[in-house]
Image (cartoon, grey):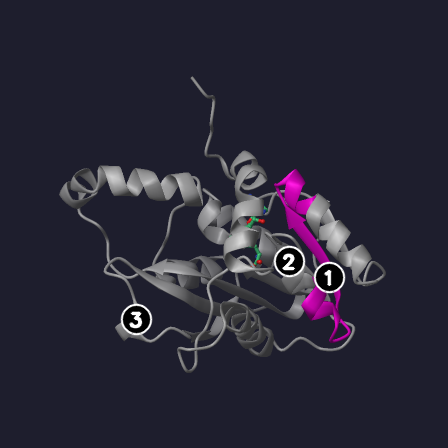
Amino acid sequence: MTDITFDPASHYDRVTAAWLWLLGDELHYGAFERGDEELQAATRHLTDLLFAAVQVESDSRILDVGCGTGAPACHLATFGAHVVGITTSAAGVEAARARAAAAGMDSRVSFELRDGMDNGFPDGSFDRVWVMESSHLMPDRARLVAECARVLRPGGRVGLCDITLHRVLAFEEIRRLRQPLGLLRDVFGDARMEPLSVYRSLFEQAGLSTSSAISPTSPGRRSPAGVPTRSAIATR
Ligand SMILES: C[S@@+](CC[C@H](N)C(=O)[O-])C[C@H]1O[C@@H](n2cnc3c(N)ncnc32)[C@H](O)[C@@H]1O
């Protein structure tokens, strides 16, 4: 019997190469304006939408929580930001460091093996906190948001973008869909979606004000249970 676990750290060590092959460099959904764009253009477009929403300034110090293999962090750094990417996947850190070195970006970006729910950085040490499609993998969402708020300097911004739930699934439905949901677990690992409203209230409980939310995917394109990619922007 194979001994496979679905906890995000070992899961992402196992699936990162496959996701890179499927999605390209940025491991998240795309924002399609026309519908016929290349996937890599759409994933980059979503990064740019969040980038504009969090109002990154030149020389901003950004914490990228759940940095994948570092492509969004390297992109943010091309605008003059200094980015620290963290992930619980050792394979992700290794790939992200190799990407930064190959792009000659290692003076502006760095990557560390750390947990977004207990990141260990000093209070108020970042101008921006960036959480792109990684929160669904963190079981204690309140801890994640509290940690984002703690390391944010006064006046700073958090941009969180993730797949969100648009309705609660009934127990009977979950039971009926046990098999397909199990298959999704093989791909996504131990993940859980939340409605956008949950994130907004967690930000508010953490003392941040939620200033806006963007939803680059039109309601017509959502799946029955989830809306790919919606974002909450919170300000200290
Ligand atoms: C879907 S990928 C998104 C990667 C990246 N943000 C991007 O947009 O390309 C999810 C990332 O979250 C990371 N992750 C999962 N749980 C984490 C945790 N508790 N703390 C930090 N990173 C975590 C995974 O290792 C992976 O890098």
The number of discs equals 3
The crowd level at tag 3 (other Cα within 10 Å; few <14, some 14-19, many 20+) is few
User: The disc labelled 1 sits on which kind of residue?
Assistant: Val
Density class for disc 1 (Cα within 10 Å; few <14, some 14-19, many ≥20) is many
The residue identified by callout 1 is: 83
Disc 2 versus disc 3: distance between alpha carbons? 28 Å
> Helix, strand or loop at disc 2?
strand
Mark before the other along the chain sequence, 1 or 2: 2
Relative to 5, is 60 on the left or the right? right
In this view of the protein, can residue 124 be seen by the observer?
Answer: yes
Q: Looking at this rendering, what residue extends furthest in the bottom direction?
A: 34
Mark 3 vs mark 1, CA separation in Å? 33 Å
- Could you tell whether 231 is left or right of 177 in the image? right
Give how far apart the Cα atoms at labels 1 and 2 are: 7 Å
Give the side of residue 91 with respect to residue 77, left or right.
Answer: left
Callout 1–callout 2 Cβ contact below 8 Å:
yes
Which structural element holds mark 1? Answer: strand
The percent position of residue 116, horizontal first and vertical second, equals 59, 47
Instruction: Single out the mark in the foreground, 3 or 1.
Output: 3
The amino acid at mark 3 is: Arg
User: What segment is highlighted magenta in the picture?
Assistant: 74-93
Residue 64's tag is 2
Residue occupying the far top of the picture: 1
Q: Residue at x 59, y 38 (%)?
A: 13
Image point 64% across, 64% down: which residue? Answer: 72
The residue labelled by disc 3 is 221
Q: Quadrant of the N terminus?
A: top left
Image coords of residue 185 (percent x, y):
38, 40
Q: In what quadrant of the picture does the C terminus appear?
A: bottom right
- Counting residues from the start of the chain, the first of labels 2 and 3 encountered is 2
Label 2 neighbourhood size at 10 Å, few (<14), some (14-19), many (20+)? Answer: many
